[in-house]
Image (cartoon, rainbow, N blue to C red):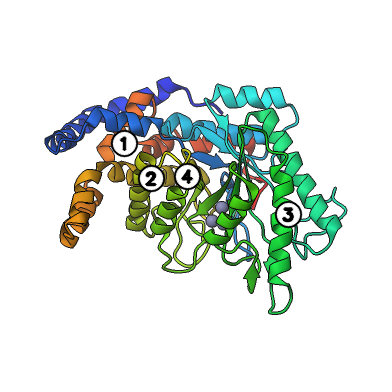
């Protein structure tokens, strides 16, 4: 299924005049505050978020998985799904593959298909948390940190293979997330586990092409419930420093203990030039992988406020790689991803409204109330017409979710793929 732009433009016509009046009202207000609206639209146009291949089917919990009709069952279909998202939103210009779930058979056909949708390949993800039939060793007691050399070696080789696959697709980074840890006190030696992990990561790092990055993701618990080897940003940061300048920390919003100040972590990592990538999602309890902005939208805005500050003031930090990492049991995955993309764009746009210079002055004058007011004024501004304008300018849909429903895209997918198709992934 391929969504042509005429159908989207046809849809847009219906709501064009509503949009124009809402946009004019907002643009006038912003202009009066000395904000350059054209600049804002351009910055939003340039902001692209990668979609993980595993978010395109319904996810699940350990209690069950409920498939969604018309799920993509091949890499080609996953590309088509992200193509639909990108056509509607113009902000999903990349896909992140997971190996072994997404091994291409015909590389040039896959690259062509991605290009035809305007997509590039973002970070490739390795998997050493599930055993694979073709592998001799088991990851039951860990992968890169395993006390057995043969297991570590297998996990290292797998990561090298993932880099090779990524090279053929034009990816520029590999993300390592490890499930390694222990379930019971006394089970593992913390120091040995970390040392083995560092040594293994260095081996993988030594195979990284010159223009690539290695992203090291941290997570406090799950699937292990007593200890995790790379449990927090400090551990990831330490490992990234040990590997070298092409290694970075990756922040997944769901990978923190309750009430952690994530915006502060983001800020410090950027100061040190080590914030490489981002996995967006939201959560109420743990690594819930819920829709971005569905539970804590203000926290998301505060995070973006630090990201914008960092992007403007920390040339030592490369431009971060943005990705969604979500999964659901009950929603239409494409509708859910559109909600996430909108929430990300919204938080970014609001953060762009903050007058960083005035905020700095208020901080220095110890005007605590003034500082808070500035942030909240930006947060309370309804900038949705700005996002609509951005999409319109880029050829997307004014209202992506509405267009998706009006154009009956899910029905078309079900007609094409059947109700029984099952996506590979978590
Ligand atoms: C796991 O909790 C992490 O968030 C990973 O980033 C990701 O979900 C996994 O690698 C998907 O395979
Ligand atoms: Zn993640
Ligand atoms: Zn996660
Ligand atoms: Zn997550």
Dot 4: element: helix
Dot 1: element: helix
- Image mark for residue 387: 1
Out of 360 and 144, give the one closest to the viewer: 360
On screen, residue 197 versus residue 302, left or right, reads: right
The mark closer to the camera, 3 or 1, is: 3
Residue at the limit of the structure toward the top, as seen here: 6
Out of 66 and 248, give the one closest to the viewer: 248
Q: Earlier in the sequence, mark 3 or mark 1?
A: 3
Out of 86 and 159, give the one closest to the viewer: 159
- Image mark for residue 310: 2
For the point 33% across and 54% down, the residue is: 302
Dot 2: element: helix
Residue 44 location in percent, x, y? 35, 34
Out of 192 and 350, give the one closest to the viewer: 192
How far separated are the C-alphas under marks 3 and 1? 45 Å
């Amino acid at each position: 299924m391929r969504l042509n732009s005429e159908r989207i433009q046809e849809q847009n016509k219906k709501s064009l005049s509503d949009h124009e009046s809402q946009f004019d009202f907002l643009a006038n207000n912003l202009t009066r505050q000395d904000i350059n609206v054209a600049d804002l639209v351009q910055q939003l146009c340039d902001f692209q978020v990668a979609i993980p291949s595993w978010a395109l089917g319904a996810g699940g919990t350990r209690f069950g998985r409920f498939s969604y009709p018309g799920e993509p069952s091949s890499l080609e279909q996953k590309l088509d799904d992200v193509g639909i998202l990108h056509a509607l939103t113009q902000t999903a210009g990349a896909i992140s593959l997971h190996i072994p779930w997404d091994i291409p058979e015909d590389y040039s056909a896959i690259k062509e298909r991605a290009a035809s949708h305007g997509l590039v390949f973002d970070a490739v993800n390795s998997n050493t948390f599930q055993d694979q039939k073709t592998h001799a060793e088991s990851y039951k007691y860990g992968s890169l940190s395993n006390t057995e050399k043969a297991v570590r070696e297998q996990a290292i080789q797998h990561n090298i293979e993932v880099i090779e696959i990524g090279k053929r697709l034009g990816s520029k980074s590999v993300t390592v997330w490890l499930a390694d840890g222990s379930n019971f006190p006394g089970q593992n030696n913390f120091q040995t586990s970390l040392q083995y992990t560092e040594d293994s990561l260095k081996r993988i790092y030594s195979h990284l092409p010159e223009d690539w990055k290695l992203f090291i993701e941290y997570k406090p618990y799950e699937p292990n419930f007593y200890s995790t080897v790379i449990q927090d940003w400090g551990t990831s940061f330490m490992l990234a420093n040990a590997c070298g300048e092409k290694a970075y920390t990756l922040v997944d919003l769901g990978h923190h203990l309750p009430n952690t100040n994530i915006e502060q972590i983001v800020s410090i990592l950027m100061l040190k030039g080590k914030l490489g990538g981002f996995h967006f999602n939201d959560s109420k309890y743990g690594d819930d992988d819920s829709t971005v902005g569905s539970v804590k939208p203000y926290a998301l805005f505060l995070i973006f406020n630090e990201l914008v500050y960092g992007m403007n003031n920390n040339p030592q930090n490369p431009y971060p790689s943005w990705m969604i990492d979500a999964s659901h049991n009950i929603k239409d995955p494409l509708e859910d991803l559109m909600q996430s993309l909108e929430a990300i764009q919204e938080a970014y746009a609001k953060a762009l409204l903050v007058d960083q210079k005035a905020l700095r002055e208020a901080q220095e004058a110890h005007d605590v109330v003034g500082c808070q007011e500035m942030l909240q004024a930006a947060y309370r501004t309804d900038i949705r017409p700005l996002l609509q304008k951005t999409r319109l300018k880029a050829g997307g849909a004014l209202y992506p979710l509405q267009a998706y429903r009006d154009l009956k895209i899910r029905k078309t997918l079900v007609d094409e793929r059947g109700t029984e198709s099952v996506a590979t992934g978590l």
